[in-house]
Image: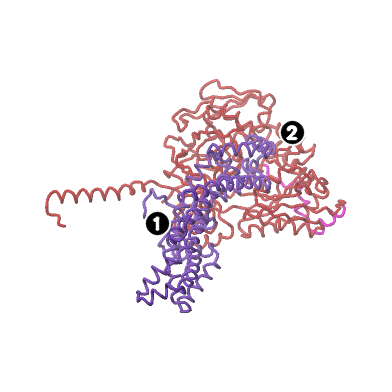
Amino acid sequence: MLAFLGRRLLSTIPVLVIVSVLVFLMLRLTPGDPAAVLAGDQASPDQIAQIRTHLGLDRSIVEQYLIWAGQMLRGDLGESFFYKTEVATLIAQRLEPTLSLALVTILLAVAVAVPLGVIAAWRTGGWLDRALMGFSVLGFSVPVFVLAYLMIWLVSLKLGWLPVQGYQRLSGGVGPWLRHLTLPALTLSLIYIALIARVTRASVLETLGEDYIRTARAKGLPESKVLMRHALANAAVPIATVIGIGIALLIGGVVVTESVYAIPGLGRLTVDAVLARDFPTIQGVILFFSIVYVLVNLLVDLSYVFFDPRIRY
Amino acid sequence: MSLTSPSKRQSAKSLIALGTAAVAAPAIAQQQTVLRVVPHSNLAVLDPIWTTAYMSRNHGYMIYDTLFGTDEKGVVKPQMVDTWSVSPDNRLWTFTLRKGLEFHDGQPVTSEDVVASLERWGKRDAMGSALMQFVARMDTPSANTFRIFLGEACGFVLEALGKPSSSVPFIMPRRIAATDPFKQIEEHIGSGPFTFKRDEFKPGDRAVYLKFAKYVPRNEPPSGTTGGKRVYVDRVEWNLALRDAQAQVNALQKGEVDIIESLGFDHFDTVRKDTSLQIPSWANLGLQYIARFNHLHKPFDNPKVRQAVIAAFSQEAFLRAQVGVKELYRPCFSMLYCNTPYGSTAGSEIQSKSNMRRAQELLKASGYDGTPIVVLKPTDLAAIQKLPDVAAQLMRQAGFKVDLQAMDWQTLVGRRAKKDPPAAGGWHMFLTAWQAFDVSSPIANPMFDGRGEKAVWFGWATDDKLVELRNQFMRATDNAQKKKLADALHARAFEVGTHVPLGEYDQPVAARKNISGFFVHNSNVYWNLKKA
């Protein structure tokens, strides 16, 4: 196991190097000039040129990359062109809203989707199964922003139950924190409920056809135990994989949801940085996302051992 | 459990007291009057001299004060300055500061702070550097008096010091103003009506300003950036995360925010019909749409081709497509903005009395060779994104070939700085909007700069006569003479075809009904506002 862990962690190094080179090159080769953005609309070409020099953008791409890579090796993500703040600080400021939203969304999605998927598989072809399939299609089809506006209109504007926008930090109390997260998490969870429920249904359905399930039923085990202890437990590997990918995607930034609900998370930071051509921030954030993806995948792989004792690393 | 024993009763009382205190604490905090504002954009750069971004300028108005201001009619009036005098030859200007001016760190504002601030501003701002060309030296005979010695008389000293828009000559403490003008300042201390809560500033999320209790406002009523800056709220919070236009209106309707600085035209009717909301006449100095030519490359290096475009560009078509709300826009054929001191329509007949047939004739006579016109179209800026489509359509009708290139605004901003030929990544035309006071003076208006590649703004118009007239305007000290020169400059700009004015519009502000005290100015500032 430790050898596996070591190998996996070592394999992240070339991944991060490749990501860093690609991101760096793509940013430099795409049109747009951070100096022009910083200088403002009324700035003269001379002023823009001075800012470009000040930011070091007049140096060769290789030179710029080596400087940045050197900073990375020292654990320094650099300073945002735009905000004059350490990129690490910006990420830290935006991490809590994004993690909170991801956590509540995934908890909500798992709590709803897994039982739904199991029941749908158990009563395959029944009304619940068909309803779940229909709901899944809806969940995948309705754009998040449409659902968000509908939810805001109904829950916030008409019923007045929850705030329209904003994020309240956890340090301000669990109540306000949850009140501000409920609506965005509900909105965002729809697609994950659809995804996880479908995967759960398919996986449990396959397991229900196995010999050991027939044996368990023949032994007279109650159906609930057959479903939960034997079917679901053995169907857990693909479900865990989907949940893991979901977590990684959620931490990777949910731009539309964060925009509509005005949540200052990593998604908005990324979009703002891209629009402003804030190279250090984009590079830092994407590197951070890469690490998150690698680690989440590693955790998912490790979780297989827990769900299926036959798996060994 | 029963509460019979004294100790248990005492404990219960303590618990109730604690509970009451816990409830009361936020209640006390809530007694603060907080104005919650959705600004028109994100605040990134905190140095309003270093950048010309409007958001940084507005941030500057919150925390800094100015020597002079410009009222809603464009008249320059004193702000930090109490009295001033000028020598008969117009070369020595002496200013005395008002008493009681104090920075947020408790230090008095002195004339040395003023001189250091002006020197830094003069190295960054176009109008500031124009003024500094005339300044021989500045000195500070006393703590509250400073003098400007001009090498040669010029007629825009007060106009420059009272400049209301980017970059505004804000007054900072000397140690901060001593920062290299090409580096951003690190401290944010001014003597304005609000202090900046640096510890609560979260980029892209929130900026917070507190009332500066020691600020001494003037006695005159507020108008533009002049008059008494009286603050009636304890705290102003800028919500920098709320960017989605629909979400902004939702939040305003729900009472989660008090003011939206820049209401989308599409939401104008929604807000107007909502009885809990209002659209104050606040920033009705408005903005002007313009189309800018790149004078460096064919075919726009030919004034006849530019005139064909001017003749084709019907302002009504642009305004109707982009703004749509009739009461918010008005055609205006002054490049110097209508109803301002230099507002003029001299020479504008080529546009105001023209039509498509005339444009076609002009284009035919110009020798246009069919070069496709590269028009830059921003796709992510709702306030101007429809203009290029109208421009392309009108130019096609006139006989041009048009290559409309879509991109995000920041790409456009980078692209327009390029002097390369359009076929090699350059451009022929882009369209944008300017606030009234950025274009209302022939000196401040960067499109009147005819120095070609040395010009301070993109497009690089070249015309010696324009340069000469502008130089005369800078030196003119008589108001009648200045107005005459402004008219001549305006007529020449149309003749040369520096750019095309596309009409004026008001950017609506939306607020909840319980907010009062709105007044006319060109920025978004939050003094004089009361929250019931």
Give the residue pinned by disc 2: B472
Q: Residue furthest top?
A: B141
Q: Residue at x 68, y 54 (%)?
A: B331
x and y percent of residue A209 in the render?
47, 74
B349 in magenta: yes
Would you say residue B437 is visible in this rendering? no
Q: Are marks 1 and 2 on the same chain?
A: no
Residue B357 magenta: yes
Q: Is residue B202 visible?
A: yes
Q: Residue at x 76, y 58 (%)?
A: B394
Instruction: Looking at this view, name the residue that lies furthest to the bottom.
Output: A126
Magenta region: B342-365
Task: Write down the colour of chain A.
Answer: purple
Q: Where's residue A247, x and y in %? A: 49, 57
Q: Which residue position is annotated with label 1?
A: A178
Q: Residues within 10 Å of mark 2 (few under 14, many from 20)?
A: some
Secondary structure beneath disc 2? helix
Q: Is residue B149 above or below residue A104?
A: above
Tell me the number on the disc at residue B410. Answer: none
Q: Describe residue B464's horizontal placement relative to residue B154 as left or right.
A: right
Location of residue A161 in the rendering, given as x and y in whole percent from the top left corner: 40, 62
